[in-house]
Amino acid sequence: MHEEPEVAVLRYGHRPGRDDRMTTHVGLTARALGADRVILPDNASQSRATVADITDRFGGPFEVEQTAELDATIDRWSGAVVHLTMYGERVQDVAGDIRQRHRSEPLLIVVGGEKVPFEVYDAADWNVAVTNQPHSEVAGLAVFLDRLFEGRELAQEWEDAENRVVPQASGKRVVDGDGAADES
C-alpha cells in the first residue's frame, strides 16, 4: 500500500481459548489498515490460519508469521518500535514524530494481549495511547494505523484477490475472481 519502509505488527501474548478472536482481529486489522505483516505468538495457530485464509481470499500482499521469541523480535528489530498502551503518550501528540521517523526506518507496532512486562515499555521508542482509558487493543491499533498513514490505507487496492467487496449503500455484493457476483 505504501512506499515507506515496512510496518509490522507484533501481537505480544496470547491466551488460547480466551484471546483467539482478539488475536485474529489484531491480524485482520493490521492487514486491512495498511501493515505489511503480523507476527503472532507461536500458540496462536488458529488466528494465523484465519488471517492467512482471509489474505488468500481477499488479497494481499500481507504476511502472517508466528514466533516463540516475542522479546527477541523486539530486541532484534532494526527500526523504530511503538508499543500501544493506555499508559503511553497521546497518539495525537506523537503521531507526526513517528510518521517522520518511519519515512526512513521500518516500524514495529507492539500490541499487548495480556500483561506486558516492563521491559517492553523500556524497549519501545514510543509508548503510545489511543486515549488513556481502557478499551480494545484492536481499536487502538486501528486508530494508530489511520494516524500513521493519514487515511491513505482506506483507499488501498488488493492484489490477487479471489473475492472483492463492492461498496454500495444497501445489501452485500462480493465479486469473485471470475467477475461473478454473490449479492444479498
Image (spheres, rainbow, N blue to C red):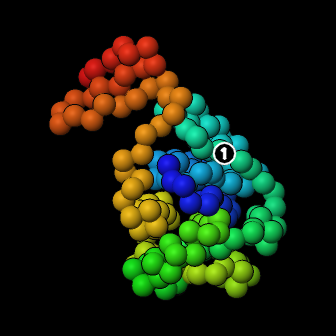
Taking depth in this image into account, of 51 and 44 the one nearest to the observer is 51
The one of 1 and 57 positioned closer to us in this rendering: 1
User: Residue 55, relative to residue 5: is it above or below?
Assistant: above
Q: How far across and how far down the image is residue 160, in percent?
A: 53, 29
At 46% from the left edge and 19% from the top edge, which residue is drawn? 177
Question: 76 and 12: which one is in front?
Answer: 76
Residue 173 visible? yes
Residue under the point 44% across and 26% down: 163
Residue 34: where, in percent of width, then height? Answer: 49, 53
Q: Which residue is mark 1?
A: 64
The type of residue carrying mark 1 is Val
Q: Is residue 105 placed above or below 88 in the rendered structure?
A: above
Mark 1: give few (<14), some (14-19) or many (20+) Cα within 10 Å: many
Where, by quadrant of the figure, is residue 18 drawn?
A: bottom right
Tell me where residue 31 appears, x and y as whole percent: 52, 48
The answer to whether 142 is drawn above or below residue 37 in the figure is below
Tell how many labels.
1
Residue depicted at 62% across the width and 37% down the height: 52
Q: Secondary structure at mark 1?
A: strand
- Position of residue 28 relative to residue 84, above or below, is above
Q: Nearer the viewer, residue 182 or 97?
A: 97
38 vs 136, left or right, is right
Name the residue rendered at 68%, 54% in the picture.
Answer: 39
> Which quadrant of the structure image shows residue 93?
bottom left
Quadrant housing the C terminus = top left
Q: Is residue 142 left or right of residue 21?
A: left
The answer to whether 61 appears left or right of 16 in the picture is left
In the rendering, at what x and y percent does residue 53 appear?
58, 33
Q: Is residue 139 visible?
A: no
